[in-house]
Image (cartoon, rainbow, N blue to C red):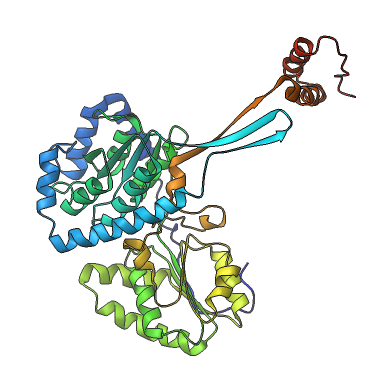
Amino acid sequence: MIPMTVEYLKKASRRSTDDASDIRATVQDILNRIEAGGDEAAKRYATEFDRYDGNIVLVRDEIEAAAEQVPQKLKDDIRFAWDNVRRFAEAQKETIRDMQIEISPGLIAGQKAIPCQAAGCYAPGGRYSHIASALMTVTTAKVAGCGHIAACSPPRPGIGVAPAIVYTADLCGADTILALGGVQGIAAMAFGLFGLPKADILVGPGNQFVAEAKRILFGRVGIDMFAGPTDSLILADKTADPHLVAWDLVGQAEHGYNSPVWLATTHRPLAEAVLELVPRCIETLPDLNRKSAADAWRDMAEVMVAPDRETLAQVADDYAPEHLHVQAADLDWFLGRLQCYGSLFLGEETTVAFGDKSSGPNHVLPTSGAARYTGGLSVHKYMKLVTWQRATRDGAKPIAEATARISRLEGMEGHARTADIRLEKYFPDETFDLSASG
């Protein structure tokens, strides 16, 4: 709960979910038709929605032709970002290892980290060509050790998938690249169309139709998370540069009209300066970006003044933002105190755009307050932590006794007898009191 001591200088007039239409029935119908009709149904939707009638599965010649269209400097930048993402993912993977422990004499249990066999990675390609989404999703799946990785991105009429996305997906290790957008792309990966194995997990951001398709399919397949519009919160004190703060807010507002951006500061003059600067910054953007950022700032943005840094932290924990950027003194205090965020950016020397594009930590993050209970996409999302156990006969003895009595107390006689018969077999000369009362 936001403390009463917080003063709003600007309050959002609407929420990111206010205009959410009921698209579930539409998406469910498309999924049903594609599942029943297979490849041909998916192709029909590609023609209808994407106005595309080229190859769905890109062949090597098409992949190489796309790479030739990407300028060398951009290739170098993509490789730089890929190396950062890959190295961070490899370090994350090292934090989970197979292990075993002797819980009691003769009883050994352990865990194994096993990657999913098939991953489906979606990279948006509508208004913006999300090169970084291909980087973040395909690279982490590859590092995790997934057996087959499909990358899927919407084609553009007469062009196909953006060449830079094709180049990136191939560089990062995609085994198959699909020219499919929206629900039909998600369906193709989930249902194993066009020769793909059925995906065990679907990851990557997308529009509301993509998000709803993943929501419907969750359970049949794993997903990274339920995603809403991107959001960002900046915490700042008197040491912050208002020009940097303003641009950091604008940079995230350009995602779309329903992308919230928030500022909470202990310094009223900073808040007032940012309120004055943001509209000026927005006016300098290209037309399409300017419209998105202006709408988001007008309707979704909030600016707050708080009495102290502890209150700033309380605001952050309540909002649980996807991106949390601290531009204040004593960054270590904030690192230790803050609890709810998708990804944390400490100091003015970093910015959310760095994380979005190239710094290494993944940019597929929880939105709409979901950072209260989950983190973002990581190499771990593609890995199953499974357990195993084995026992000697002597080691099984106390386990069987406890299991029999607990099972009978619960009324589960069948469970109890699976323990009884082992005691009878292994220790025929002994007598055990296995009643619920002990």
Q: Nearer the viewer, residue 12 or 53?
A: 53
Residue 128 in view in this figure: no
The percent position of residue 291, horizontal first and vertical second, equals 27, 69
Locate the N terminus and report the quarter of the image it occupies: bottom right
The number of numbered discs placed on residues in the rendered structure image is: 0
The percent position of residue 247, horizontal first and vertical second, equals 35, 77
The percent position of residue 137, horizontal first and vertical second, equals 35, 48
User: Is 141 on the left-hand or right-hand side of 426?
Assistant: left
- State which quadrant residue 276 falls in: bottom left
Residue 350 in view in this figure: yes
- State which quadrant residue 424 falls in: top right
Q: Nearer the viewer, residue 57 or 438?
A: 438
The percent position of residue 434, horizontal first and vertical second, equals 85, 19
User: Is 382 on the left-hand or right-hand side of 433?
Assistant: left
**Residue in view at x 27 percent, y 48 percent:** 172
Residue 9 sits above or below residue 101 on the image: below
Q: Nearer the viewer, residue 307 or 381?
A: 381
**Residue in view at x 42 percent, y 54 percent:** 228
- State which quadrant residue 402 falls in: top right
User: Is 41 on the left-hand or right-hand side of 390?
Assistant: left
Locate the C terminus and report the quarter of the image it occupies: top right
Q: Nearer the viewer, residue 201 or 215?
A: 201
**Residue in view at x 32 percent, y 62 percent:** 358
